[in-house]
Amino acid sequence: MSGLDGMQRKSKKARLVLSSPCAPAASAFGFLFVPSSRGMPKCGCVQGCTACITSISQPMNIILYLVFHQWAEWRRSYLARAPKVGEKMLFRYHNQDVPCRVIEISQAGLYTVRWPPDKKDLKPGNKMAAKKSIPRKFLRFRDVRFPRSWANWLVKHLHLVEGGTAEV
């Protein structure tokens, strides 16, 4: 518990993670799960998981908890930042998310975008389209996934797999 400060120890999530080695905190990674008390996985991931984890110790659980919260904090700040000129984004257009590129930002904070973002994505017979005066609420960043290098590091250093390789 030396890695957690007083505030983190008192939080609901910390109590959940620290109270039981079978807490579901690791499932938020998308590639890990924590087995239930009966030995059956509590896995909600859709991209595959390590089906051979048998037990996670208290220190492993704390490491997973801290790494996940560091990742979640970075992801939140990354997705909340203001777009820059040249950045690829998703534009909400006629109830669809269209990949686009920001080409101009006005003084009023409105964006001009063009789609598709690159000429190589242009289908034969189509032209580049552009739209001006788009408010920020119609633009969003593409979702970011948990870094593969972090996943590999966790699997390697926490020995999460017995006799096989993890599906990350």
Image (cartoon, rainbow, N blue to C red):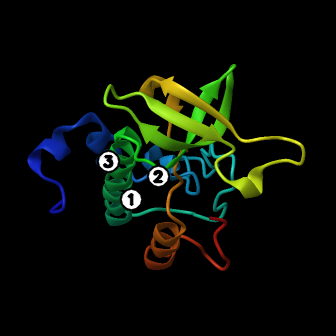
Q: From the top left corner, tell me how far across and down residue 151 is, in percent.
A: 51, 67
Q: Which amino acid lies under the numbered mark 1 shown in the image of this protein?
A: Leu
Q: Which residue sits furthest top?
A: 94
Residue occupying image coordinates x 32% and y 25%:
108
Residue denoted by label 2: 26
Residue occupying image coordinates x 58% and y 57%:
31
Residue denoted by label 1: 64
Q: Is residue 91 left or right of residue 129?
A: left
Q: From the top left corner, tell me how far across and down residue 82 is, in percent.
A: 35, 40
* Residue closest to the eye, 136 or 129: 129
* Numbered badge on residue 73: 3
Q: Is residue 38 above or below residue 129?
A: below
Image quarter hosting the C terminus: bottom right
* Residue closest to the eye, 79 or 44: 79
Q: Which amino acid lies under the numbered mark 2 shown in the image of this protein?
A: Ala
Q: CA distance from mark 2 to mark 1?
A: 6 Å
Q: Is residue 141 left or right of residue 168?
A: left
Counting residues from the start of the chain, the first of labels 3 and 1 encountered is: 1
Q: CA distance from mark 2 to mark 3?
A: 16 Å
Q: Mark 1 and mark 2 in contact (Cβ < 8 Å)?
A: yes
Q: Is residue 8 left or right of residue 167?
A: left
Q: Which residue sits furthest left?
A: 6
Q: Does dot 3 land on a helix, a strand or a loop?
A: helix
Q: CA distance from mark 3 to mark 1?
A: 14 Å
* Residue closest to the eye, 84 or 130: 130
Q: Nearer the viewer, mark 3 or mark 1?
A: 3
Q: Mark 3 and mark 2 in contact (Cβ < 8 Å)?
A: no
Q: Which amino acid lies under the numbered mark 3 shown in the image of this protein?
A: Glu
